[in-house]
Image: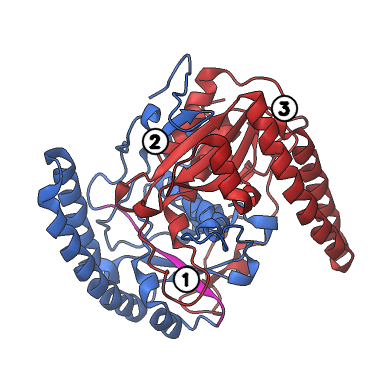
Chain colours: A red, B blue
Amino acid sequence: MAELSLYEALRTTRAVRRLRPDPIPDAVLARVLTAFTWGPSGGNRQPWRLLVVRAPHLKVKLQRMYQELWSEYVQASRAGLPSLPERSRARAERSLSAGDYLASHLGEVPVVVVVCFDPRGLAVTDAKLGRQSVVGGASIYPAVQNMLLACRAEGLGCVLTTLLCTRESEVRGLLGIPEPWATAAMVPIGYPVGRGHGPTSRRPLSALAFGDRWDEPLALACESE
Amino acid sequence: MAELSLYEALRTTRAVRRLRPDPIPDAVLARVLTAFTWGPSGGNRQPWRLLVVRAPHLKVKLQRMYQELWSEYVQASRAGLPSLPERSRARAERSLSAGDYLASHLGEVPVVVVVCFDPRGLAVTDAKLGRQSVVGGASIYPAVQNMLLACRAEGLGCVLTTLLCTRESEVRGLLGIPEPWATAAMVPIGYPVGRGHGPTSRRPLSALAFGDRWDEPLALACESE
């Protein structure tokens, strides 16, 4: 499993929300978490801490919070389904129903990783642009992606979620996270109920990339899609 | 090259700032950019556009902006060097000197990818917490990391930079980026001058991960570090 090729991992890592309660061997978990630490960060400051939640009473409390947030989210999302084209709708429905599964089983998932960060360790170059800032995430989410890819290589399902950030102060209290440390993601990890990962569904590169300037086609002699 | 194993890629992808001007074959570039598109995003909305800048006159203009920002940054960083412990200082000096190289050669790097995003496509769950928001980045930087890893597999050097975001309105004008699209990163890509990628230098997992709650040791029977 560990010898999965990089491109195969990139191509087939997707959000897996139906996870079995079976435990994850320590050696496997260590590899997955170590992959996180190899991620890049501004000035290599590694402004992260991973809270690796395995205690059932904590996972159950996280589930309760998550479930409330998910119910609100899913209600809004389901209301928007009829306006989607048929193919997108079917996909969105499957994804919401997998999300329902996660929300009602989070307490039994073997490992829930809460990704914490220190805002003092971020260089936020888009803080003063008068638009939503995202650059702080450049020192956090590449490392999260490393962890998701490592899960893929280990046959583990996982999904990057951020809903719980809404209730950060409660999560902080529950897990003892000191100020000014904050939460960037919750990643449930476990063996998949079904097939788990598989080919991702994305728009083609030609719809997502331009050559040189906006709206100019990217002319590449050979596209690998 | 394409068969590099996932773990080897994760373990050895680092910031490579000394890049040769040699061109990147289209097929290679297409693979690297397609790897980006496989990244996850909230609701799979793929709120991205990649501006793949290869025109010399545009790269030279990006270099001028970048060089000014880099000069300010490096001045502040060099001032802080004497206070660092010797080993960190040596590493920081090497990194700054590689950054100098990038700033003075950016115009000759074969490809500069400007990563754009649509703020309307982000679900920002930490927007109202009274702290620096980072969650918007969860729909952008995992995909950027995919691209960096693919570069590694192709023998290409690259580095995730965000300095240019400071001058986003100028970059927008130069590359014709329409409102409300914004910039999240600039990633120069080229074949490395030296060895390029190699083992990363990070704190051990035990310093970055806790078990269950903050400050509780993560007890794993077997750590792979």
How packed mark 1 is, by other alpha carbons closer than 10 Å (few <14, some 14-19, many 20 or more), is many
Which residue is found at the position 18% from the left and 42% from the top? Answer: B88
B183 inside magenta stretch? yes
Q: Which residue is mark 2?
A: B11
Q: Secondary structure at mark 1?
A: strand
Mark 1 — on which chain does it sit? B
* Front residue (pair A122, A16): A122
Q: Measured from the top left, where is residue B139 in percent x and y?
A: 58, 57
* Kind of residue at disc 1: Thr
Nearer the observer, disc 1 or disc 3?
Answer: 3
- The region drawn magenta spans B179-192
Say which quarter of the image contains residue B79: bottom left
Q: Which mark is residue A155?
A: none
Which residue is found at the position 36% from the left and 38% from the top? Answer: B12
B127 inside magenta stretch? no
Q: Which residue is mark 1?
A: B183
Q: Is residue B12 above or below residue A133?
A: above
Spatial CA distance of label 3 from label 2 is: 31 Å
| Left or right: residue A38 compared with residue A223 | left
Q: Which residue is mark 3?
A: A108
* Kind of residue at disc 3: Glu
Residue at mark 3 shares a chain with residue at mark 2: no
Q: Secondary structure at mark 3?
A: helix
How packed mark 3 is, by other alpha carbons closer than 10 Å (few <14, some 14-19, many 20 or more), is many
| Left or right: residue A115 compared with residue B215 | right
Q: Secondary structure at mark 2?
A: helix
Q: Is residue B207 above or below residue A138?
A: above
Q: Measured from the top left, where is residue B151 in percent x and y?
A: 42, 50
Mark 3 — on which chain does it sit? A
Quadrant of image for the N terminus of chain B: top left
Spatial CA distance of label 2 from label 1 is: 28 Å
Q: Measured from the top left, where is residue A192 in percent x and y?
A: 72, 30
